[in-house]
Amino acid sequence: MTNAASAGYDPHGIELRRQAQWRERDVFRTPPPAEDRPHLYIKPSAPFTSGNVHMGHVRSYSIGDAYARFRRARGDDVLFAFGFDAFGLPAELGAIASGERPSEWVKRCAEHMRGQLERLGFSFDWERAFYSSDVVMYRWSQWLFLTLLEAGLVYRGVGTVDWCDTCQTTLATIQVEDGLCWRCHNPVRLIQRAEWNVRISAYVPENDERLAELEDNWDEISLASQRFVLGRVDGVEMELRGPDGELTVFTQHADALELARFVLISPRHPAIDGWVASEDAREQLEELRSGGLERASRDVDAIALIDGGRTLAAPLGGAPLPVLVSPLVDGRFGTTAVLGIPERDHSDEVIAARLAASAGGAAGGARGGAASSEYAASAPRPAVRYKADDFSISRQRAWGTPIPVVYCEACGMVPVPKEQLPVVLPTDITPTGSGNPLAEREDFVNTTCPSCDGPARRETDTLDGHFDALWLWIPVCVPVHAREQTLEQILALADLRHWLPCGRVVAGSDSGNFVFDQRIVTKALRDIGPLAFLSDGEPFAGCLFHEMVISDGRTMSKHLGNVVDPDALVERFGADTVRLAALYAARPQRSLNWSESAVLRCHRFLTQVHDYVHAGIATTQALASADGASESAEASGEEPERDTTEHLRKRLAGWCETGVQKITEDMEELEMHTAARNVMRLFDRIRDFEKRVKARRQTLGREDSEALIEALAVLVRLLAPLAPHLAEELWIALGNRVLDRQLPWPGLSLVAPA
RNA sequence: GCCCGGGUGGCGGAAUCGGCAUACGCAGCGGAUUUAAAAUCCGCGGCCCGCGAGGGCAUGUGGGUUCGAGUCCCACCCCGGGCACCA
């Protein structure tokens, strides 16, 4: 074996061999809960089953896997597994394009991706992997939907969607091209439609308050993303009264109340109807609600603006303020009412200008006339508004979790009782792009009312993948044998209490919304009961967001022709090189501009380490076989060679110690790129040691050689989380036994000789 | 427009706390090895002036703080990403 290996670095042979060994020994299986052992759940992002692993996945999982392997090497029990996010529009589009069923498309894509990920050697516990589109899994969504519905955290509302009259179907934004349907190229219109919403607003303030507690183990990007999603605005609020009633208004400019010129109210404000006086304004509001707001015109100079014709007191007295309606408020402060202060706020300045332009009409100063006693304003008090708001979770799609609700002629809307779950999605649907395939399935739609047993029709909207994501982080904690149990049983398992909260999320910086909403729903389930053991309502104790992988300074896309294919790189250089390069090329917090030079550098490094270790072994063996000769020479009374290299060995030992210390710190901080650089530096120093010894005494002495081997054994273990296949292979070549779980981290466990 | 990143040689990028700017690598050039090529290894290398010793200029632009600034402060320019039925 030594001969074959020393012939040269053969990544493919090594990687297939190590991966086969890993499977055989089942090394990445999640250990059963043992409270006396340190343990950690590391959560990789749930990949969408798009069909191909891309460089972003490689980066993300290389970071997470390096961390998982590091923690195992330190003796921790690790849970490292994920579920495929398998529902969603692209599966339907893929199915439309290929004429197959979405379920088949997803299965094919996921299997291919799993093959790619296995080839890269990530240490996932594959036994616990799952598809969110499996019945046994999407019943979680249905259970969660019903649970939140009971708690009043899911509610029915009205929203607008793009609709194609020709195809008789709802269109997603990406299916609308210049106002035309992507499929038939006829004009698209916005229609009003009933939808299901999730009331995250109930827990937004707590998500804000808890943020400070996360600062120790959440990196700056992930914290910033939470602050961004939160959209917290600090200011003051006060009650303003006018002839038509009272309204609480907010502003972030507490020191400029006298400069207020108008009140801006959200069209979704609960009390909106009282602030629209004229028939004309009511019509405009109705138009706005039913889709008059063009998606393209969200800019302040084009956004809808309605003068409601009512007035309120100015905060500090003076001329009454007109009340204007605009969805501009929603995007900045939520469904509230705010003061317009043109001198302080650019948007307000634009609104004021638009107002002045239309003041030629009646809107200007003709109102008023009311007695000034009708106007009053309370004193301002500190207040907070959040941009984060409730969102729609229902979609008119055939490939999603069926919403467990039926409509009965007698009873109206009736939730499906939890013990009757799951509501099964027919998998033999082949969408064509027109109509609503699920709604056309009579065998699905027609059912009986759970309440009165009379005829009823099922809800044909499905849940958005975003809703699935709310629970997607939990099921890997469940041992596979318990997966079929009822959710009540599952949620009572000790496994959940053991592994949760998740110790570390590793995900792309675009995951901020998911994580935010997962934090919300954890708090809801804490209060409802199932997750009561998470007293702070936080699902993730630690979090690392990394930036994107780009190419030529741009996002990778087929259109730009700058896509880097991980398979081709693995084929050329092997998985270890590709993974190491993904870690080495940039620190997680920076976008990784992919370049050949990083991968070439890493490949050369691994080749050199491979060759150098084998050369070192050969030298040691040669010295060992010559040992007898030198002993007889000593016995014959020859003067023993003076030890002139002891100080070099000491220095080498010092370098190793420093290396272990620094790289341990790097790994703990998930600074994989610094860790990679420090491993490379240590290797340079080991080679430097040999060079210096040879400069002094031509060849290595036995002690030098042993010191060298010892240093290489340290190096190989430090390399193991970053380039696991080669490291393990070299560890064995250095005469060590492979332990059951993982190469032990240097300084922490005893080296076990063969 | 708003929010978040970023700007250092021909290229990707180093520079941990404000302390020798350009580590390491790619491409390039020279050499070794080779029948040859590939691969590998060794050496050189910011820009300008100078035969040379040497000198001058350089981290997007303009100011500022400092003994000292790629790094800190202010203003601006440019590039990238995101902005909710894409996940």
Image: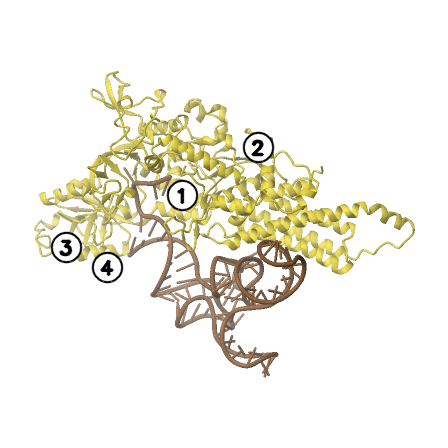
Q: Which residue is mark 3?
A: A319
Marks 2 and 4 share the same chain: yes
Q: CA distance from mark 2 to mark 4?
A: 67 Å
Q: CA distance from mark 3 to mark 1?
A: 47 Å
SS assignment at label 1: helix
Of marks 3 and 1, which one's residue comes earlier in the chain?
3
Q: Which amino acid type is shown beneath numbered disc 1?
A: Ser
Task: Name the mark nearer the viewer: 2 or 3.
Answer: 2
Q: Which chain is yellow?
A: A
Q: Which residue is mark 1?
A: A511
Label 3 is found on which chain of the structure?
A
Task: Name the mark nearer the viewer: 4 or 1.
Answer: 1
Please report the residue visible at 9 percent of the width from the left and 49 percent of the height from the top: A371
Q: Which residue is mark 4?
A: A343
Label 4 is found on which chain of the structure?
A
SS assignment at label 4: loop
Q: Residue furthest right?
A: A636
Q: Which residue is mark 2?
A: A23
Of marks 4 and 3, which one's residue comes earlier in the chain?
3
Q: CA distance from mark 2 to mark 3?
A: 78 Å
Of marks 2 and 3, which one's residue comes earlier in the chain?
2
Q: Indicate the position of residue A476 as horizontal and vertical percent values.
A: 47, 31
